[in-house]
Image (cartoon, rainbow, N blue to C red):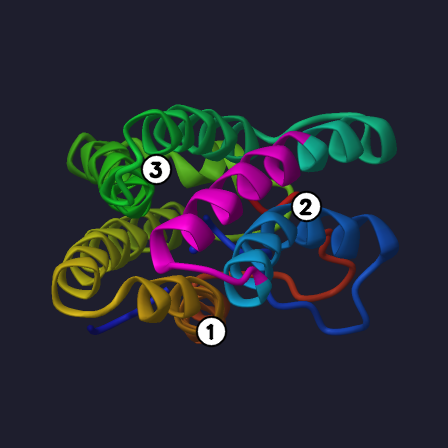
Amino acid sequence: MADRPGPDALPPPLETGAPSAPAGLALACDIGPIAVFFLVNFLTPGLQISRLLTATGAFMAASIAAMVVSRWKLGKISPMLWFSTALVLVFGALTLYFHNEEFIKLKPTVIYASLAAILGYGWLTNRPLLQAMFGTTYQGVSARGWALLTRNWAFYLAFMALLNEIIRHSFSTDFWVGFKLWGAIPLTMLFSIANMPMLLRHGLQTKKSPVPPAG
């Protein structure tokens, strides 16, 4: 995609130096619950459905813990963390109640598709919604740069929604769980890094750029 500019979430932008402690903690609050989900599913003995149910319960608990830590240590909970945790609790509860893994596997699709629709609407109506979230981080970016960033994230998130559907229908549950940690997160970080040349061409200031909470 020309002028390319993020879970299941948008990652923090690329920094020129080492990440600050709050930035690292914010990233941990985003990735931590997914890592717990993966580890519990991997380490719990028994049938696949039993392992996934146990991992789902741990995922829900870890997501709540991430919100508590974010509020305690960072002083706030990002909108993305609120949104993703709410869906984890809803789809996790459905998974546990019906003993059906498809509910928790559908959650990333809902997150990706919802964000893609919101950002796509913002792009089509000339409302670069990402500017409200990352305006203090991507300092100096022009209106054109924000429009491109919003458009490209909308397309990327739509792609991730489609990819999650393909994986959950075509591969095993263990593969899907592993992809959430070892596939979706690296892909999103790489895509975020790929945005940087475009943002630099549209005025991004690289010095002393703070990192917002990922989520």
Q: Indicate which disc, 3 or 1, sits on the residue closer to the N terminus.
A: 3
Asked which quadrant contains residue 145, the reply is: bottom left
Q: Give the mark toward the camera: 2 or 3.
A: 2
Is residue 79 depicted above or below 124 in this figure? above
The residue at which mark 3 appears reads as: 128
Please name the residue shown 63% across and 34% down the image: 61
User: In terms of depth relative to the viewer, which is nearer, 60 or 67?
Assistant: 60
Tell me if I can see residue 8 in this picture: no
Element under disc 3: loop
Alpha-carbon distance for marks 1 and 2? Answer: 17 Å
Residue 188 pos. (x, y %): 42, 65
Is residue 49 depicted above or below 193 in this figure? above
Q: Which mark is residue 161?
A: none
Q: Main secondary structure of the magenta part?
A: helix
The residue at which mark 2 appears reads as: 29
Look at the numbered discs 1 and 2 and tell me whether their residues touch, using CB distance below 8 Å.
no
Element under disc 1: helix
Horizontally, residue 203 falls left or right of residue 32, namely: left
Alpha-carbon distance for marks 3 and 1? Answer: 30 Å
Q: Indicate which disc, 2 or 3, sits on the residue closer to the N terminus.
A: 2
Residue ranking furthest to the front: 46
Q: Indicate which disc, 1 or 2, sits on the residue closer to the N terminus.
A: 2
> How many numbered callouts?
3
Look at the numbered discs 2 and 3 and tell me whether their residues touch, using CB distance below 8 Å.
no
Q: Which mark is residue 182?
A: 1
Categorize mark 1 by other alpha carbons within 10 Å: few (<14), some (14-19), many (20+): few
Q: Give the range drawn in magenta.
A: 44-64
Please name the residue shown 68% across and 46% down the image: 29
